Amino acid sequence: MRLLFGLLCFLLIVSCAKKPKKEAALINYIDAPSGPYSSLPNMFSNTKHTLMSWVEKVDDSTTQLKYARLINGEWKDPQLILQGRDWFVNWADFPAIVENNGHLISHILRKSSKETFSYDVRLNVLPKGESQWATDLQLHSDATKTEHGFVTTLPYKEDSFFVTWLDGRNTTSSGHDHHDGAMSIRSAEVSSKGMVSNEALLDDRTCDCCQTTASITTNGPVVIYRDRSEDELRDMSIVRFVEGEWTTPKSIYNDNWQIKGCPVNGPKSAAIGNNLVVTWFTAANKEAKVKVVFSSDGGESFEEPIRIGRSNVMGRVDIALIDSENAIVSWMETIDKEAQIRAIKVHKSGKISTPVIISRLDASRKTGFPQMDLVGDKVHFAWTDVTNEIETVKTAYVLLELFSV
């Protein structure tokens, strides 16, 4: 009898292992600075400032880009950057804001013709000490009526920004399949005044519409993106800026995901010194997975991937590096036809914490890509909630100490 009781206790313990923690006791919601009809949040944080940008629909044709600062745990003083009637507003390709020593930069996508997939990246800058944004500045040097987007911007040097984006100048078709040429990925440096320099081609054939990501390592900037081979293998590649030159694109890991169309599900990375971590989604061999890899040499080499979540993951990932060995990863997953934002702590050895459910939400494209950032001893989250067909930005945080491996 005692043996049977012990066995039942053991099975109960095993069945409870790694089940997600209940969100009610862990999630601290913060009043978002946005109102109804807001969506597409994007967060930026460094040791001094935490910002969030988002878009708001004024009417069927007018969109605003706004931002706010996180001050003493609250979003304060929402500000309008600009508004427009000719923007390309997309669930997966959204504006962002970044700060560097008091200088601010943001971007939007503006239509360049009547064709659906014809738009430019337009920059907005607010130099330190100035009160008026300089808006509608061109990022890329070409004037082709093609796609330009999926921008990643980072603080770089004392008063400039590193920017990378997907560029369709070599595609001449007006559709989204680019039969006449391939999408490329490029980078440039942008000054606090909006001057663009050092534009470079990083890879002349990439996936069409997956988000890009980048990090600044001790060695220099690294860019990670979904590549595209002639055989339609769409795995993650990295290029690194080392001693003044960009390296040849190199695969992070050969998932060998062969897919004829873009999965619209890009990677995320973070770095401290030369410690780099990358997370991404793949569905190679028809099995959905979220993976994480660590590097201790600025992306020259990587450890073996660590699998995150279960086979019903949707991707839409984000990541924050805590130290050289630990990171927080977030992703979306479907449970019984319900979508959830989940987050865990992962150690480079492969050990992971119990998942925390951040929010339950609609699985449609309207919910976009949830955002996550590490702010001191808190992990902050932002996402788009859809209730009664109304989109609204939501924000919350979880104490870092609650993610225990």
Image (spheres, grey):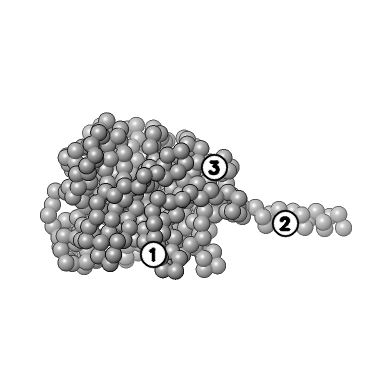
Secondary structure of residue under mark 2 = helix
Q: CA distance from mark 1 to mark 3?
A: 28 Å
Query: Mark 1 Cα within 10 Å, few/some/many (few <14, many 20+)?
Result: few
* Front-most of residues 28 and 145: 28
Question: Type of residue at label 2?
Answer: Leu
Q: CA distance from mark 3 to mark 2?
A: 28 Å
Mark seen at residue 12: 2
| 268 horizontally vs 330: left or right | left
| 173 horizontally vs 274: left or right | left
Query: Mark 3 Cα within 10 Å, few/some/many (few <14, many 20+)?
Result: some
Look at mark 1 in the image and give the residue it sits on: 365
Q: Eyeballing the image, is 48 above or below 84?
A: above
Q: In the rendering, at what x and y percent does residue 173 appear?
A: 17, 66
Look at mark 3 in the image and give the residue it sits on: 399
Circle nearer the N terminus (1, 3): 1
Circle nearer the N terminus (2, 1): 2
Q: CA distance from mark 2 to mark 1?
A: 37 Å
Secondary structure of residue under mark 3 = strand
